[in-house]
Amino acid sequence: MLPVQYEAYGLRWLSQFQMPELQIVQNSSQDAGDIDVHIQSADLTALWEAWNVGNENFVSRDGSLFFRIEDAGIFLIEQGRRIIVNPKQNADEKKVRLFILGTCMAVIMMQRGILPLHGSAVVIDGWAYAFVGHSGAGKSTLSAALASRGYPLLTDDVVALTWDAGGRAIVSPGYPQQKLWQPSLDGFGMKEENYATVHAEITKYAIPVQHYFHERAVPLAGIFELNPKPNDVRKPIQLTQVHGLERLHLLCTHTFRSTLVARQGLAQWLFETVSRLSASIEICRLTRSGSDFTAFGMVERITDHVRKGVHTEQ
């Protein structure tokens, strides 16, 4: 099979693996100058052994990161330009792609100076708003609820941030898919039999969102950290501003695969990048309590706050 050219996170990817989640570049050429990153298949076993990493599953040298996932394969990310994958025999193809789309692409971004935050983003009145939080905090659920109210999805899972010539933080579109857990499907009245799971081992579903996907980069106006407290007595949704050094801590904490930053010698880069970002946007925290489905209540809280703010459509 000939490699296919895809577009995601503001980059062009030429892949030997079929990546049905990504958008194919129409009328693409194979000119090397048009390609930002190559995704290739190769036997990495000998090279992994030559690196002599011992019991480590992640190791970085000379601008490259090597890692191994026991039931998926071996992955090598080289200097922001190439991902080489050695899938384990009989590995679940969806799981292999999950690591390409997640960890591998996030490392590529770090190596290229693009900040990957762990979150989702939508477009409200011409501006991007990102939602960050720990796994299970409800980032994808909230962005899906906003999309259902007419606010297009820009990216899910990874928010790729760069800067334009005027110094504004810019969010590049990801790809037209969301991943939702079973309780979120239930909350939206969606039937799991209509969707495929992300991979065979979990009940998280891949939801195509082409009809409400925003395909152009958008300046970032604000970030909301989701802070669920399911075991607390239910109270009204709280929205508070985040100030001072806590803003830097929040941005570092919610950098996608943040443990791989220092391993690659990029700690100073991350500090400088989040400092620049912190100085240019609003950062808030959304706290919801109880275990009820509150996504639409959060939508109202967010849109009310945004409409009272200083950003208007460009």
Image (cartoon, grey):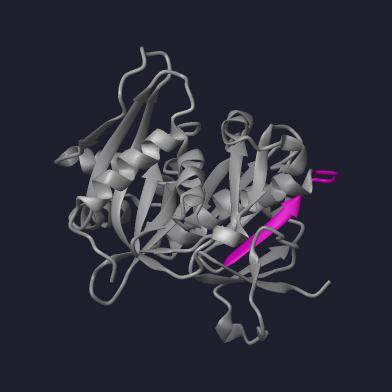
- Does the magenta-highlighted stretch encompass residue 87? yes
311 vs 253, nearest the viewer: 311
7 vs 224, nearest the viewer: 224
| Magenta residue span | 82-91
**Among the 4 quarters of the image, the one containing residue 133:** top left
Q: x, y percentage for residue 240?
A: 21, 35
Left or right for 312, reference 255: left
Left or right for 82, reference 286: right
The N terminus sits in image quarter: bottom right
208 vs 308, nearest the viewer: 308
Q: What secondary structure predominates along the stretch shown in magenta? A: strand
Residue occupying image coordinates x 45% and y 32%:
137
Compared with 99, 287 (above or below) is above
Compared with 18, 267 (above or below) is above
Left or right for 186, reference 143: right
Q: Give the total number of marks visible in the rendering.
A: 0
Residue occupying image coordinates x 51% and y 60%:
108
Residue occupying image coordinates x 24% and y 63%:
312
**Among the 4 quarters of the image, the one containing residue 189:** top right
**Residue 273 visible at all:** yes
**Among the 4 quarters of the image, the one containing residue 24:** bottom right
24 vs 304, nearest the viewer: 304
- Does the magenta-highlighted stretch encompass residue 68? no
Q: x, y percentage for residue 2?
A: 80, 75
Residue occupying image coordinates x 26% and y 50%:
306
Q: x, y percentage for residue 27?
A: 67, 85
**Residue 175 visible at all:** no
Left or right for 267, reference 157: left
The C terminus sits in image quarter: bottom left
